[in-house]
Image: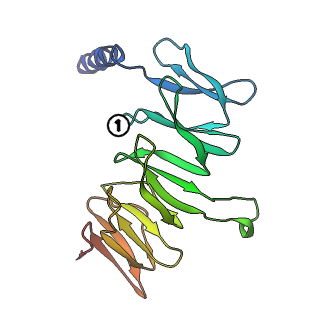
Amino acid sequence: MKHLFIAIAVVLFALSVSAQEEFLFQFKDAKGKYGFKDMMTNKVVIPAQYDEVGNFMREANLAWVKKNKKYGFIDNKGKLIVPLIYDFALDFTNGRALVNKGRHTTEDPAGYKPGKYGFIDKTGKEVIPLIYTEAEFFNEDRARVGNGEKVGFIDPSGKEVIPLIYDDADLHFKEGKVEVTLGEKTFFIDKSGKKVK
């Protein structure tokens, strides 16, 4: 009985939300191109035309798309909000999307070029300059960034809250702390950079 009640509540919630916004999911056509369909009606909302696509993230209601080796972002109607000018992009987290210019990948690792990473907001404005040779998406209001030699962490405003002094670090914070390596020592720090257990 309890499971039935939960199932009914989930369906009612989905129906009430769907009246306000569409839930889109990816599909791939016979030519290998991607587009989006409405989850409730299964109707095509954005025709298949992209080489790859990301997910519509609720906080920004934008999805990254890739066409002719370039990335940009579309809204849930298919309008291109951020032009196809980037060489890499990830979904929005903490109001920011990780983007890159100059990245080049090949099957031969020797041919890899990292380019420069930074972050855009949902209007497409580069709010954190593309200056890093490595970067990860935001998690717990922190994103790992690197300059090719050292790594540290920034907040969503772009402030280096944990300076790029570490030789290595886990990719993301978990429960307010992250493991870092400095020389021969490995230890945990909190979001302000203070050493913790």
Where does the image place residue 26, in percent across and percent down from the top left?
56, 28
Name the quadrant of the C terminus.
Answer: bottom left
Front residue (pair 117, 184): 117
Vertical placement of 24 versus 133: above or below?
above
Q: SS of the residue at dot 1?
A: loop
Q: Is residue 33 left or right of residue 97?
A: right
Image quadrant holding the N terminus, namely top left
Residue at x 73% of width, y 70% of height: 110
- Where on the picture, by quarter, is residue 43? top right
Q: Residue at x 28, y 73 (%)?
A: 189
The reply to whether residue 54 is visible in this rendering is no
Q: Amino acid at mark 1?
A: Glu
Query: Residue 109's x, y, as percent?
Result: 71, 66
Q: How is the image coloured?
A: rainbow
Residue count near mark 1 (Cα–Cα under 10 Å), binned few <14, some 14–19, many ≥20: few
Residue closest to the eye, 6 or 52? 52
| Residue in the image at 62% along x and 51% along y | 87
- Does residue 175 sit above or below 46 in this rendering? below
**Residue that mark 1 sits on:** 59
Query: Residue 86: in sight, yes or no?
Result: yes
Q: Position of residue 148 (x, y in %)?
A: 54, 75
| Location of residue 35 with respect to 138 vertically, above or below | above
Horizontal side of residue 54 vs 23, given as left or right:
right
> Which residue is painted at 69% across and 65% down in the image?
112
Tell me the quarter of the picture where residue 169 sits.
Answer: bottom left
